[in-house]
Amino acid sequence: MTQEPWRARTAGLIAAGAALLVSAAVDALYVPVPSLVLTVGQAVIRLTPGSLARRGVETFGTSDKPGLVLGVIVVSLAAGMAVGLLAARRRVTGPIAFAVFGAIGIAAASVVPGVSVAGAALAAAAAAGSGALVLAGLLALAYPTPPSTPVIGAATSRRRFLLATAAVPVGIGAVAVAGRRLSGSSRAAAQRLAVRLPRPATTAPRAAPGITDVPGLSRLVTPNADFYRIDEALVVPRVDLPSWRLGVTGMVDRPFELTYDQLLALPLEEHDVTLSCVSNEVGGNLVGTARWTGYPLAALLQRAGVDPKATQVVGRSVDGFTAGFPTEAALDGRHALVAVAMNGEPLPTRHGFPARLVVPGLYGYVSAVKWLRDIQLATLDFDPYWVVRGWARNGPIKTQSRIDVPRSDARVPAGRTAVAGVAWAPTRDIARVEVRVDDGPWHAARLGDTLGPDAWRQWVYEWQARPGTHRLAVRATDGTGVTQTADRAEPFPDGATGHHTITVKVS
């Protein structure tokens, strides 16, 4: 055992970090595989049971993926420290451990659709080899005598070791950063910036400003930067626009493909649609409204000729994710789109560039496929990604409402106080919103401007607040006359229910 085990741990830590950086550098140079950290993380997502995946979204929300990446990195670095200690006693442990590290990366790639196993093997070999070499070099500097001999590090030896531990990650990191500037992600971003959208053949009515005099109230149209993102992609797919094709396949008479330019050349339509995640809790923020531009899904299916036996439309992403919904939902007259633009600009990469599905009235887990590659007609015998994990096959968005202002547990002054928020029931519109104070009667709120039956409505209720602690609740009634239920239900398996209720203190 060495007399200075901190050197062994540090050597293992730096070697593991070097392996991760080399993997990132290989990815940056556009080998067709993400870094091993992302590959392992994506495999964890694919193999995680539905109940655990659901808890992850509910607990961490949009921070679930950064948390997973950080977890993979921390575990890798901790393992590297352990390997450093073992290799200080027996040097052959280092190459063996890093070979296992690479094998895990290759195994992870084999279960992630769309990831090249050959590319993963190349990245794994580069990462494992560099990790083993860095560990061997640092241990040679840390313990210049055989490991069986007690060592008291000299100042010169210590300086060389510390310089090496600083130089290795800086050097490899610089390569990774330089490669990233030349990477596929940069090319994909440049391709998106070069897109010039045509004027839609059918435009939505000019958006009204809505209720703008209540600070903190959600805007009528959600800015792209603020729109929620929930999906299974640990890293946003890098789509090469010239080679991208959208296929309409499966149980159709005339399967076909479209290039991006051909899709843009079709008569596009513009519609305001509210999307919501099935994981959204009552009063949650996994919901937003945007002005989507795209080509009607029904028109694409009619061009292909749908087999009468096809009961499900399955969207498939470039990364292998699938979501499916009843065929009738694409043909019943709702504004289902293959969207290419969001709020007047090409789809942001994180929201599905170059194309995605937008189906009003359905939760995203059954419909909103981003980075769309194929639209397949199938039967209900096929189980898409989340259905396999226990979520309901059908995902109609429930009538919901939310209090934005005031915030829960806020202190407000006595007197006239605005209680405001949004309510949504895509395809059914919102007919009425009501607010209740404590256990009193329901009072009608004033509805804001409408963007149409597929978009949410703002609302505001002028409350004469009296001193004390009060509970405020809201409920909405949709255009079919259905009032949202007070019965509380968790998001799993088909969406949360209940009245959003907050507590405020009036002084």
Image: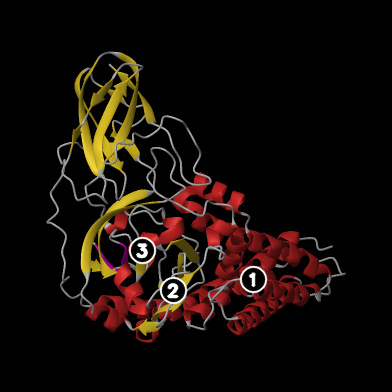
Q: Which residues are magenta?
A: 336-342
Label 2: which residue?
Answer: 307
Q: Main secondary structure of the magenta part?
A: strand
Horizontal side of 437 relative to 314 (left or right) equals left
x and y percentages locating residue 128 in the rendered image: 67, 77
Label for residue 108? 1
Q: Earlier in the sequence, mark 3 or mark 2?
A: 2
SS state under label 3: helix
Q: CA distance from mark 3 to mark 1?
A: 35 Å
Q: Nearer the viewer, mark 3 or mark 2?
A: 2
- On-image quarter of the N terminus: bottom right
337 magenta-colored: yes
Query: Residue 181: which quarter of the image?
Result: bottom left
For the view shown, which residue lies furthest in the front direction? Answer: 308
Quick one: label 3 or label 1, which is nearer the N terminus?
Answer: 1
Q: CA distance from mark 2 to mark 1?
A: 37 Å
Residue at 13%, 49% in the rendered image? 208
- Left or right: 206, with 481 as reference point: left
